[in-house]
Image (cartoon, rainbow, N blue to C red):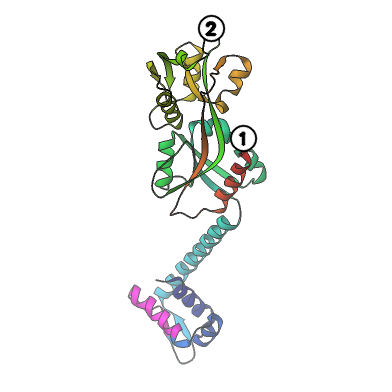
């Protein structure tokens, strides 16, 4: 059953004339007849009877007419809703975000967008970078915000902000950290595999040929910060996540010349899914974050 056939049938009931319906829909009278015959064939019943002067609904046709009105109304409402999604920033936007971005950067962005677009709603999934890329790949979210790099097929990645990672220790750690050798055989508190921050840590260790004495793996930035505050080890964390701790002195930066880690915050989208207006609005806001 096609919607144009349904529209033809409703028009026939309303106009009671093949000629008038053909003119109204800008189709030929034979096409009007074909539309009706197709519906009657599909439902194996007679919907309209014709006399020389008038069209009459059969009992089955009466039932079909009432249901057709409901279906056409639902169809129009669906078209209007989809059109609205493409032309206006409103409705639901599903966002996936890595922990660093989702917990420390995204809330401020969403607050700004909420003021600009009061009819826009958000559903946020926060997980590590690999999980967010997978969610984009599987269409579970419309757009993902990640740290580091992804090589997943069918997903495009676009950087929107540079991020600096700092080595930190607890405030009462008075050890000397002036050269790279002072980072040898240290205890570290690190993120789990699949995290963008973990990949940055692994790069730091490999690039500087450091030997790790021990490591405590925690899948939460907040958990890592609290562990470092309690003297459980050093950590490599995004500057965006530790501004308050550095400001109030509850964490202390270890600044060693020529030892630094930077990365990009990026948005990722599925190549097979064209972005709606809502996602474009988010991207526009993300681009304001460029340093």
Q: Residue at x 60, y 48 (%)?
A: 281
User: Quick check: 287 above or below 169?
Assistant: below
Q: Where is residue 9 in the image (x, y as percent from the top left)?
A: 46, 77
Give 10 or 121, whichever is nearer the viewer.
121
Question: In the rendered image, which quarter is residue 164 located in?
Answer: top right
Find disc 1 in the rendering and name its residue: 108
Q: Nearer the viewer, residue 28 or 96?
A: 96
Q: What element carries label 1?
A: helix
Residue situated furthest left in the rendering: 44
Magenta highlight range: 31-49
Q: Where is residue 108 in the image (x, y as percent from the top left)?
A: 62, 35
**Could you tell me which residue is drawn at 44 percent across and 89 percent down?**
51
Q: Tag count in the figure?
A: 2
Q: Residue 3 carries which label?
A: none
- Tags 1 and 2 touching, CB below 8 Å: no
Overall secondary structure of the magenta section: helix
Q: How crowded is mark 1: few (under 14 residues within 10 Å), some or many (20 or more)?
A: few
Seen in the picture, residue 45 relative to 170 is either above or below; the reply is below
Along the viewing direction, whichever of 239 and 81 lies nearer the viewer: 239
Residue occupied by mark 2:
174
Q: Earlier in the sequence, mark 1 or mark 2?
A: 1
Image height of 156 relative to 162, above or below? below
The C terminus - image quarter? top right
For label 2, the crowd category at 10 Å Cα-Cα, with few meaning under 14, some 14 to 19 and many 20 or more, is few
Residue 49: % across, % down: 41, 84
For the N terminus, the image quarter is bottom left
């Amino acid at each position: 059953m096609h919607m144009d056939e349904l529209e033809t049938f409703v028009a026939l009931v309303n106009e009671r004339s093949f000629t008038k319906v053909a003119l109204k829909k800008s189709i030929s009278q034979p096409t009007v007849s074909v539309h009706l015959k197709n519906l009657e064939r599909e439902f194996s019943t007679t919907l309209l009877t014709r006399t020389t002067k008038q069209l009459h609904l059969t009992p089955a046709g009466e039932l079909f007419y009432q249901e057709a009105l409901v279906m056409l109304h639902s169809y129009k409402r669906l078209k209007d809703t989809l059109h609205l999604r493409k032309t206006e920033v409103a409705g639901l936007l599903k966002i996936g975000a890595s922990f660093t971005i989702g917990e420390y950067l995204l809330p401020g962005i969403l607050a700004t967008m909420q003021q600009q677009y009061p009819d826009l709603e958000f559903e946020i999934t926060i997980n590590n970078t690999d999980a967010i890329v997978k969610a984009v790949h599987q269409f579970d979210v419309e757009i993902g915000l990640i740290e580091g790099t992804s090589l997943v097929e069918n997903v495009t990645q676009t950087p929107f902000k540079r991020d600096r990672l700092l080595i930190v220790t607890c405030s009462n750690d008075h050890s000397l950290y002036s050269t790279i050798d002072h980072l040898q055989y240290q205890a570290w508190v690190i993120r789990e595999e699949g995290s963008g921050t973990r990949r940055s840590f692994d790069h730091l260790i490999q690039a500087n040929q450091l030997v790790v004495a021990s490591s405590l793996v925690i899948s939460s930035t907040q958990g890592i910060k609290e562990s470092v505050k309690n003297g459980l080890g050093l950590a490599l964390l995004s500057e965006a996540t530790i501004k308050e701790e550095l400001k109030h002195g509850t964490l202390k930066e270890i600044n060693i010349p020529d030892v630094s880690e930077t990365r990009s915050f990026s948005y990722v989208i599925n190549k097979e899914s064209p972005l709606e207006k809502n996602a474009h609005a988010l991207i526009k806001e993300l681009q304001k974050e460029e340093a």
